[in-house]
């Protein structure tokens, strides 16, 4: 049987909808037996929901590079 | 008056504590973009509601920061100082668009039918029972809380988390960007998420 650490990582994969069918099956079995991991799954989904709700935005990587260049240009 | 406040020894202890906590801060403009650009960008976007304008405001903030770096007294943290510059930039932005609008605004109020209902200020206020503004404000605060927690993560973890969660890149793309293999990436993201949960737990509410 899988240990909790692996189960937690599968749980994180599920948050991004990238767990395989086999992994989902394994975590189902594990969750039946493990109360700690059930709590973790709950917390992890909450975090996903919060991130969705906050509607965070970032500057893209290229945009950041552009900014960095401009900044270092100004510094000299 | 509270007699406790007049006690000189207590006053001294408070000021002592204050000065010891105020260690001198230094500016590191090279790390600004990595550390604060997302934070400032989210703040700006919540104020101006336009990604392009927000981007410009962040850039102007960094430039202004560089320009007035000499005036930085080292009393506040770098981030607080940058945010205070950004706040001024946002105000300037609204001043600018308001001065452009001013003329047409006057004309509209003059040509309006005064008999029409809703002309008085009292009738134009927002619906006080609406919950929409409240939740918008709450989401904005939540966004800032999450951003602050992300800033506390190790650099690589923070980058992996933002690329995957906020930018929504695929696993392969993130792996290529960070030059790691997928199982490493999942471990990193898992650690970042665990740290974020703890951080939000103390800074936001129980999750």
Image (cartoon, coloured by chain):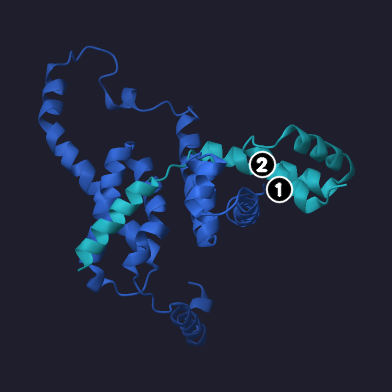
Up the image or down, B28 lies above or below B206; here it is below
Q: Let me know if residue B61 appears in the view.
A: yes
Residue picked out by circle 1: A9
Q: Is residue A4 left or right of residue B136?
A: right
Q: Quadrant of the C terminus of chain A?
A: bottom left
- Residue at horizontal 89 percent and vertical 43 percent from the top: A33
Q: Chain of mark 2?
A: A
Q: Position of residue B206 (x, y in %)?
A: 67, 49
The answer to whether mark 2 and mark 1 are in CB contact below 8 A is: yes
Residue toward you, B196 or A68:
A68
Does mark 1 fall on the same chain as mark 2? yes
Give the class, few, some or many, for how many residues have Cα within 10 Å of label 1's Cα (few <14, many ≥20). Answer: many
Up the image or down, B97 lies above or below B191; here it is above
Q: Is residue B126 left or right of residue B130?
A: left
Element carrying mark 1: helix
Residue picked out by circle 2: A13
Q: Position of residue B75 (x, y in %)?
A: 36, 73
Q: Let me know if residue B138 appears in the view.
A: no
Element carrying mark 2: helix
Give the class, few, some or many, for how many residues have Cα within 10 Å of label 2's Cα (few <14, many ≥20). Answer: some
Kindly indicate which chain is depicted in blue in the rendered structure: B
Q: Colour of chain A?
A: cyan
- View extreme (bottom): residue: B9
């Amino acid at each position: 049987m899988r240990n909790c650490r692996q189960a937690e990582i599968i749980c994180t994969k599920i948050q991004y909808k990238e767990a395989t069918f086999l992994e989902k099956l394994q975590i189902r079995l594990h969750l039946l037996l493990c109360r700690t991991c059930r709590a973790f799954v709950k917390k992890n989904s909450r975090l996903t929901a919060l991130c969705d709700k906050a509607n965070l935005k970032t500057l893209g990587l290229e945009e950041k590079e552009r900014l960095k260049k401009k900044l270092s240009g100004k510094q000299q | 008056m509270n007699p406790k406040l007049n006690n000189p020894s207590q006053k001294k202890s408070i000021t002592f504590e204050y000065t010891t906590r105020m260690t001198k801060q230094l500016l590191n403009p090279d790390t600004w973009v990595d550390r604060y650009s997302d934070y400032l960008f989210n703040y700006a976007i919540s104020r101006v509601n336009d990604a392009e304008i927000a981007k410009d405001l962040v850039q102007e903030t960094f430039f202004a920061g560089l320009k007035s770096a000499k005036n930085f007294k080292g009393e506040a943290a770098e981030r607080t100082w940058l945010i205070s510059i950004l706040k001024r930039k946002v105000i300037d932005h609204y001043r600018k668009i308001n001065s452009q609008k001013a003329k047409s605004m006057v004309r509209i109020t003059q040509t309006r039918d005064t008999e029409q209902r809703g002309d008085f200020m009292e009738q134009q206020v927002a619906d006080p029972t609406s919950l929409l503004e409240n939740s918008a404000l709450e989401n904005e605060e939540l966004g800032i809380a999450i951003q602050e927690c992300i800033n506390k993560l190790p650099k690589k973890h923070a980058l992996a988390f933002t690329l995957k969660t906020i930018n929504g890149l695929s696993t392969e793309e993130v792996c290529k960007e960070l030059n790691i293999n997928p199982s490493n990436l999942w471990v990193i993201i898992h650690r970042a998420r665990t740290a974020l949960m703890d951080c939000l737990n103390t800074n936001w509410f129980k999750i």
